[in-house]
Amino acid sequence: MYKKIDQKDIEFLKSVCGVENILVGEEINEDYSHDELGGVEKYPEVLVNVHSTEEVSKIMKYAYENNIPVTPRGQGTGLVGAAVAIYGGIMINLSQMNKIIELDEENLTLTVEPGVLLMTIGQYVSERDLFYPPDPGEKSATIGGNINTNAGGMRAVKYGVTRDYVRGLEVVLANGEVINVGGKVVKNSSGYSIKDLLVGSEGTLGIVTKAILKLLPLPKKDISLLIPFSDLGTAIETVPKIIKSKCIPTAIEFMERDVILAAEEFLGKKFPDNTSDAYLLLKFDGNSKEEIEKAYDQVAKLCLECGAYDVFISDTQERNESIWSARGAFLEAIKATTTEMDECDVVVPRDKVAEFIKFTNELQETLNVRIKSFGHAGDGNLHIYILRDELNKSEWNTKLKETFEKMYEKSRELNGQVSGEHGIGYAKKEYLNESQSESYMEIIKNIKLAFDSKNILNPGKIY
């Protein structure tokens, strides 16, 4: 059993962080009881705004000695309840630890605190002709949240995911000790890769208080292609052929007409084309117009051979922004059309994407529930949303469980995984258990035990 917070605990927290940074009971904003989707709700007993590694360390040492659960939190843009205080206790808000500490242009690294926003990093480095490739849709997320979920995003096809760009971490452990893992070195075979284990651990193994990120030189040009198809199956079946062509785009997204129409209505802006039932959206980047044109010309011809109606080339910043701002608004646009929704963030092999999407379309009819989807066709990561609409709470819970079970069962059949980039958190842990062997889950539990023997750090998540 965890200790309940009392006045003595609150006084200790005030002594560490200052009275103005401690919020209790009704002082805690409703936003901190849930994340972006809001399917899991629970208030922490006390919310602490921290500003330094030293403060986080002192809080964790105290929590460890007194058996108090602690939930680390960034901007709360997650979708699986990972930043919700399931057992109450202390919530540590890291979003005010938001300094850019150092740009090292010799080693191409950026050292930041965990509360720096992804959009801030993107703007800061691009102004200096540098590039941080991971590109999740939610640009107002903190880098700490991205690291904790190993966020991917649209550029993963060419550049990889967050784990590929984390060189080093400063981490506060459950007992308050501070460790540094990795660093500015490019190669490292010095024992187990604790850094890579911490990336994607959803705040259950340690609290990231500093990160050293790898940067690349900024590509000088980029061009997007919007490619309409008669149906989604034909569009998605073209993707493995694009990858095989060796002219690898930076991003390959798929979308259907109804999601585009929802985004148009949500943004109050027209998409370049909304007349076809299905689309691929491709982006190419490089250092010269000639280099990019050579790549996209080959891919455009291939798409037309595979049944595309046309290829719209978007080679101005204004056109690019109109397309990608619509793509970035898909989640909010779908959310605006219903009363509540939940997401299946499944990932399957690239050549199975079409089969999985066809299955979800059939499931919509079979179970009589509205399902919308879009996602990263180039890496097999699908974002599939189940919409509540007018269902009552009991019907919704039953329908949701049934839909998830069938989708994750299909994912296992296709050699897929439960989550491509949003993590497991609280909401998806039963599906992780179903998809993995007992031996695998036992290893996960033992890793947790090694880092946090009292299970006080973000308990109730992942397993």
Image (tube, rainbow, N blue to C red):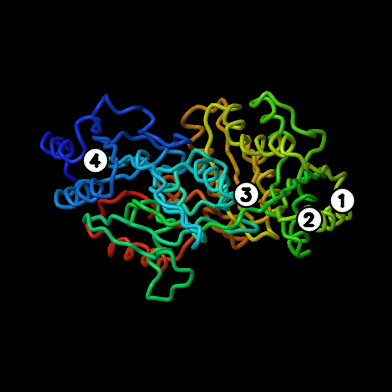
Q: What whole-number distance in Å separates the C-alpha atoms at marks 2 and 3?
A: 18 Å
| Contact between labelled residues 3 and 2, with CB atoms less than 8 Å apart | no
Q: Nearer the viewer, residue 114 or 40?
A: 114
Q: Nearer the viewer, residue 241 or 181?
A: 181
Residue 51's label in the rendered image is none
Residue under numbered circle 3: 154
Q: Amino acid at mark 1?
A: Gly
Q: Quadrant of the C terminus?
A: bottom left
Mark closer to the observer (2, 3): 3
Q: Earlier in the sequence, mark 2 or mark 4?
A: 4
Q: What whole-number distance in Å separates the C-alpha atoms at marks 1 and 3?
A: 24 Å
Q: Amino acid at mark 4?
A: Gly
Residue under numbered circle 4: 89
- The residue lying at 33 percent from left, 39 percent from top is 93
- The residue lying at 78 percent from left, 61 percent from top is 241
Neighbour class for label 2 at 10 Å: few (<14), some, many (≥20)?
many
**Image quadrant in which you'd find residue 452:** bottom left
Label 4 residue SS: loop
Residue 307's label in the rendered image is 1
- The residue lying at 54 percent from left, 28 percent from top is 391
Q: Earlier in the sequence, mark 1 or mark 4?
A: 4
Q: Nearer the viewer, residue 120 or 353?
A: 120
Q: Position of residue 355 (x, y in %)?
A: 70, 54
| Contact between labelled residues 4 and 2, with CB atoms less than 8 Å apart | no
Neighbour class for label 4 at 10 Å: few (<14), some, many (≥20)?
many
Q: What whole-number distance in Å separates the C-alpha atoms at marks 1 and 4?
A: 57 Å
Q: Amino acid at mark 2?
A: Thr
Is 27 rendered above or below residue 250?
above
- The residue lying at 36 percent from left, 40 percent from top is 84
